[in-house]
Amino acid sequence: MTEGGVAEASPRCGFVALLGAPNSGKSTLLNRLVGAKISIVTHKVQTTRSRIRAIAIAGASQIVFVDTPGIFTPKRRLERAMVAAAWSGAQDADEVVLLYDAARRAVDPDTRLIVDGLRKRGRTAMLALNKIDLIARAKLLELAARFEAEGVFSRVFMISALNGDGVDDLRRHLAGRMPEGPWHYPEDQLTDLPERLLAAEVTREKLFLNLHQELPYALTVETEGWQDFEDGSARIEQVITVARAGHKGICLGKGGRTIKAVREAAQRDLEAMLGRKVHLFLFVKVRENWLEDPARYRAMGLEFDV
C-alpha cells in the first residue's frame, strides 16, 4: 500500500517480439519505444541480423522488446539463420507485434509470408500499421480491415515510428498485457547487449550507410580490444571482416576516405552512447569463408545449421 492507502500495482514483466518484412521500420520503432538508440537504423533492408533485446518501462511493467531480423524468403545460409532467429523470437515471446509499412501500394510477399507463418504456428499478433502520415485515412481504414479479415490479429494500431504518433498507445497496451511477475532487469538498463557488441553494431551501421550494393551484407564487425583509461576515455579496436580481397579496397576507399568517414561517424555515436571520450581504431581483414564459419554465427547469436 502507498502512504495514501492506494494499493500499488503489481509488477509485470514480459517479452514482445517485433516482426515485419525487411525495412518495415522495426528498428526505428524499437528505438522509439525504448527512448534510446539500441538497434541499427538504415535505408537498406536486412540490417538487423540477430535478435536484439531492448527494455522499456511503462508504469509497473517492464517490457522486453525483441527486435528480430526481417522475415523474407531466404536464399543463403546467413539469410536462413536470420529468418530462423526471427521466428524463434516470435515463438518465445509473450506478445507479438507485426509492423507493416502502410505506405506500400500492395501487401508485399514477405508480409504475406509472415501472416501465413503466424497462422500456421497458431500465434495471434497485434498489427501496427506504420508511416500513417504518408497515407490517406480512408485507405488506411481499408488496409486495416483487410488485415483484420486474416483472423490472426487481436488488435490494430496506427502509428508513425519516425515521429512517435500512436506509439505511446501501443506501449501502454503492451504494458497491460505483460504477465505479472518480477522485473528481469535493473530499472536503468536499456539492453542486454554487451557494450563490446553494441559498439560493433554502431560501426556496422556506419558501414551500411557509407557502402553500396551487396558489400554490407558480406562483412561483419567484431570488437577485439577495449581498454579503459584513468581519464575516463576508452580505446576500442574493431576488425571489419570482408569476404573478398576486392572488398577491402572498397571499405578503405580512395586514400582511406571511406574508412575515415566510417570511423569518425562511429566514434561520435560511441562517445554519445558511452558518455566519454573514445579512441576508435578500425582494421579491415579478408576472410573468404567467414560466411561459412560456425563461430561467426555464434558470435551473432545465430544458429549455423538451419
Image: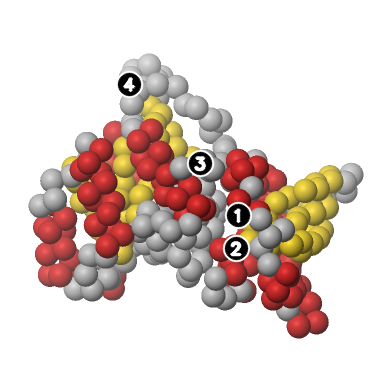
Find disc 3 in the rendering and name its residue: 305
Q: Are marks 2 and 1 in contact (CB under 8 Å)?
A: yes
Which of label 4 and label 1 is nearer to you?
Answer: 1
Among numbered discs 4 and 3, the one appearing first in the sequence? 4
**Whole-percent x and y of residue 179?**
33, 26
Q: Is residue 141 left or right of residue 229?
A: left
Q: Are marks 2 and 3 in contact (CB under 8 Å)?
A: no
Among numbered discs 4 and 1, the one appearing first in the sequence? 4
Among numbered discs 4 and 2, the one appearing first in the sequence? 4
Among numbered discs 1 and 3, the one appearing first in the sequence? 1
Name the secondary structure under disc 4.
loop
Quadrant occupied by the N terminus: top left
Label 4 and label 3: CA atoms lie apart by 54 Å
Find disc 4 in the rendering and name its residue: 6
Which of the 4 image quarters holds residue 132? bottom left
Q: Amino acid at mark 1?
A: Leu
**Whole-percent x and y of residue 35?**
49, 51
Crowd around label 1: few <14 · some 14–19 · many ≥20 (10 Å): many
Which of label 4 and label 3 is nearer to you?
Answer: 3
191 shown above or below 129: above
Q: Is residue 21 left or right of residue 231?
A: left
Among numbered discs 2 and 3, the one appearing first in the sequence? 2
Label 2 and label 3: CA atoms lie apart by 19 Å
Find disc 1 in the rendering and name its residue: 291
Q: Residue at x 20, y 43 (%)?
A: 119
**Which of the labelled discs sits on residue 218, or is there none?**
2
